[in-house]
Amino acid sequence: MLMAHPTVLRNLIEQYEALRVLHAEDGDEEARQRMDDVAYTLCVSTGTSDVDSALVAARHQLPGARPEDDSVLSA
């Protein structure tokens, strides 16, 4: 499987988290579409099928990631 560059992953994580903080899922069509696009790109970039798994996988691929599994931690 191809691996996304850490800079790309970091950027996608930051975009998704910013959209989530702004409650884009409850916003207008453009905001919801942007959030869906970033979530989809995260999933494709990490080989996962849902955004929560994609976020965990992306964080683990970043330099300095902890070896522990944080998949049970809430955001």
Image (cartoon, grey):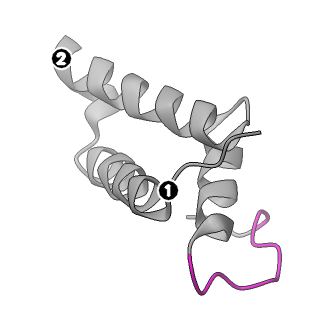
Badge 1 marks a residue whose secondary structure is loop
Q: Main secondary structure of the magenta part?
A: loop
Alpha carbon distance from label 2 to label 1:
27 Å
**On residue 5, which mark appears?**
1
Q: Please state, as top left, top right, bottom left or bottom right, where the C terminus lies in the image.
A: bottom right
Q: Position of residue 22 (x, y in %)?
A: 22, 47
Q: How many marks?
A: 2
Residue 28 seen by the camera: no
**On residue 60, which mark appears?**
none
Q: Is residue 32 left or right of residue 8?
A: left
- Tell which tag, 2 or 1, sits nearer the viewer: 1
**On residue 30, which mark appears?**
2
Q: Residue 64 is drawn in which quadrant? A: bottom right
- Residue occupying image coordinates x 69% and y 56%: 57
Q: Please state, as top left, top right, bottom left or bottom right, where the N terminus lies in the image.
A: top right
Q: Position of residue 65 (x, y in %)?
A: 64, 81
- Residue occupying image coordinates x 80% and y 83%: 67
Badge 2 marks a residue whose secondary structure is helix
Which stretch appears magenta?
63-72
Which of these two is toward me, 73 or 65?
65
- Residue occupying image coordinates x 75% and y 72%: 70
Q: Is residue 2 above or below residue 18?
A: above
User: Which three-letter amino acid code belongs to the residue tagged 2?
Assistant: Glu
